Amino acid sequence: MTLLFNSLSTRARLSNLWPKFYATPAREAAAVGVALTVAALVATYPLVLHLGDALPSDLGDPLLNTWILAWDADRIRHGLHGLWNTPMFFPYDNTLAYSEHLLGVAIFTAPIQWITGNPVIAYNVAFLGSFVLAGTGMYLLATALTGSRLAGLVGGVAFAFLPYRADQLGHLQVLMYGWMPVALWALHCYFVTGRRVALLGFAVAFLLQGFSNGYFFYFFAAAVIVIATAETAVRVWSRPRIVVELVVAALLMTAATIPVAQGYLSAREAQPLYRTRGEILMYSADALSYFHATPRLAVWGDVLPAGKPEGALFPGFGLLVMAGFGLVAAFIRTRHGPKLGRIAAVYCAVGLVGFVLSLGLELTYSSTGLLESGPYDWLLRVVPGLDGLRVPARWAVLVFLALTVLAALGVRRIVDLVPRRPARALCLAISTVFIIEGCHQVHLEPFPQRPIAPERAAYDWLRSRPPGAAVIYPIQPRDPVVNTMRYVYRTLEHRHPIVNGYSGFGTTLVQTLTLQQRDFASYGDILRGLRELDVRYVVVHEHRFQDTSWMRATDGPTLIAAIRAQGDQLVTRYRFGTSSVFELLPWNPPDVDPTEDQTPIDLSTLAVAASHEPRQLRNAFDGDDDTRWTTELPQAGNEWIELTFDQPTDVAHVRLSMASSPHDYPRRLVIEGSGDGRSYTELYQGPAFPGFALGLAHDDDTALESDIALPPNRSRTLRLRQTGSSPDFYWSIHNMELWAR
């Protein structure tokens, strides 16, 4: 780094040389990139020794992003065919849209994936490359804006080694912010030189930034609007065509995003892919978040508080001091070159936008409300798709961008005031401070490319089997996610879609299966539902039940026994040590809809009685899915409902609607008819809700229904008895309908 400082010119007459800095030689940029690569390898050591067998931070989001990059690489090789329908969260469509698609990263890592066959290497190269891209991009931008290569290098070091990176180690998409300064360098070049090729470069870099992280489509667009407006206002009178060219560029960039936007829009049409107000508030910054730091920081981690989730936004005291100095210095006249005050003012505006919007819906200071509804709240109502972003605090990237540019202006002033050799030494010292403040330990989580023996044997067998979806047990809650991500990652090997999945969003089906995992009496219904969804395989890793305390509460052998007890639904079981694979029979849907010759029965006139909550029973007959009858107690096997008719009735068909209570279906249902109210004849015994999973898989709002056909009868009284058990769920009916022959 010292040699690089000494090799760069420290002074230049801005009035003559400034435009030339926008055409920084590729060799010079490459030299900076090499220096930053070395620095990144040192800062993340020993990652360089484990590029193929470990991931930085953990096996949650990093493993998810590793898998996404591998999926993208596979789809790129096939012309992006089927890109959005990933092999997780079966049978939902467009499941890639539940997370960042990372195409802006994958186009660079795909060749590494193809050559090495190791997705972990591809991810780690991208992780290290994020340092280099951020630093090199800021070097180009800061050099162009200040006319000083030293200022550019100091700015590059600051931007590459922000303390913020330590809090975002697991979020590759957030670390890939380096296309911002590249795009702004090209944009400023366009304004200074008028060259359309520079405008094209800006458009490409902007799209790469947005395709690396969807958040940045919004964040960076705000910064570009501020900068472009300011630059256009200065030049529009001398170059009127500039407005037309910018509008055309904006339209072309918008058109380029349409295929990606369609993937996300299609997913939102099927699933509620939006964030609640509570989530957004949780992940909004506080004004004091900019003085909160992650404990991972070597210098400040034990000194500054950690703050809110994703609220460790401390930029470093060194950067704050230099930015403040640069802001003041920019408005001091010098003999050299153009005034830099306008640059400082523009980037102050960018930083202010980022700061205010990072505070989210409510502006707070030390958890004290300053405004109940901030600008972000207004944007949320008018900007399409913004409600899908969970973390407003990430707007802080614009603050860091602005601070770095202001700090580079400060270095420019030092270069002007201090003799050459001391200036070099001072800039080296400033860069060292930036690196030290951003220094943090990079924890490496080992991840072998091959799973443990039982799982490897099960997946090898699965890979040889005919196509069909699988569900893998144990199913974990969203946190912890390690096992879930292991399941998702192994789809790259066995090539079968799985019901399991992990993302910023989830599915109701996975939630249901998770909740009912320990409801062993329900596995007859669960398997019927899975078969109806065309799930063909059930994989159980008994050894994984010991990984966490939550999973230890679920008894693996008991689960195996519960599945084996459903022999009429199984083809066979294959055992591989502590891993088992059950193959399910294909689903043959029964025809149980009411026939045309059957007539609806008016239930409003019937006498009704129930074992539990009889005053609520009329809710089951009011035709309103928003009301229900419920036992208010978990199912114990002694619940019943009785309907009494005015005269003997041949009840042909019963329909029970669960509406918004899909878990509250009767685990075992007996329907009996009586002509005298004393002796009863059994008309039906069996599952009451065999197709519950199908409704859950398609829409949260689906009115989930169970249709039961009854044999001929002459009933004055119809009794529905719940004879199963559930440790957690009530018996609920939102609507009941009857038909007579």
Image (cartoon, grey):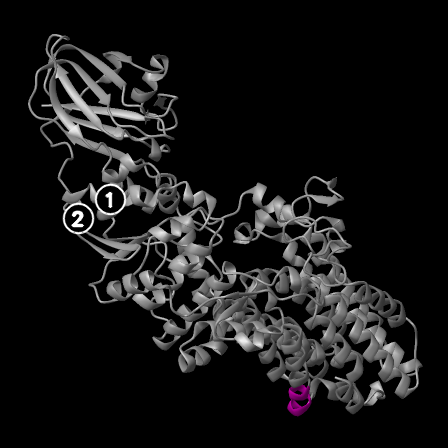
Name the element at disc 1: helix
Q: Amino acid at mark 2?
A: Leu
Q: Nearer the viewer, residue 600 or 368?
A: 368
Residue matched to label 2: 570
Q: Which mark is residue 740?
A: none
Indicate left or right for 672 with 379 as reference. Answer: left
Return the x and y of residue 165 as percentages of the image width and height. 65, 64
Q: Which mark is residue 563?
A: 1
**Which secondary structure class fits the magenta region best?**
helix
- Inspect this view and state whether residue 147 appears: no
From the viewer's perspective, is residue 146 above or below residue 542? below
Return the x and y of residue 597 as percentages of the image width and height. 9, 28
From the viewer's perspective, is residue 163 above or below residue 475? below
Q: Nearer the viewer, residue 507 or 575?
A: 575
Q: Amino acid at mark 1?
A: Ile
Return the x and y of residue 244 as percentages of the image width and height. 61, 73
Disc 1 to disc 2, C-alpha distance: 9 Å
From the viewer's perspective, is residue 684 above or below residue 3? above
Return the x and y of residue 736 as percentages of the image width and height. 26, 24
Indicate left or right for 478 with 232 as reference. Answer: left
Residue displayed at 72% across by 48% down: 286
Indicate left or right for 359 with 596 as reference. Answer: right
Name the element at disc 2: strand
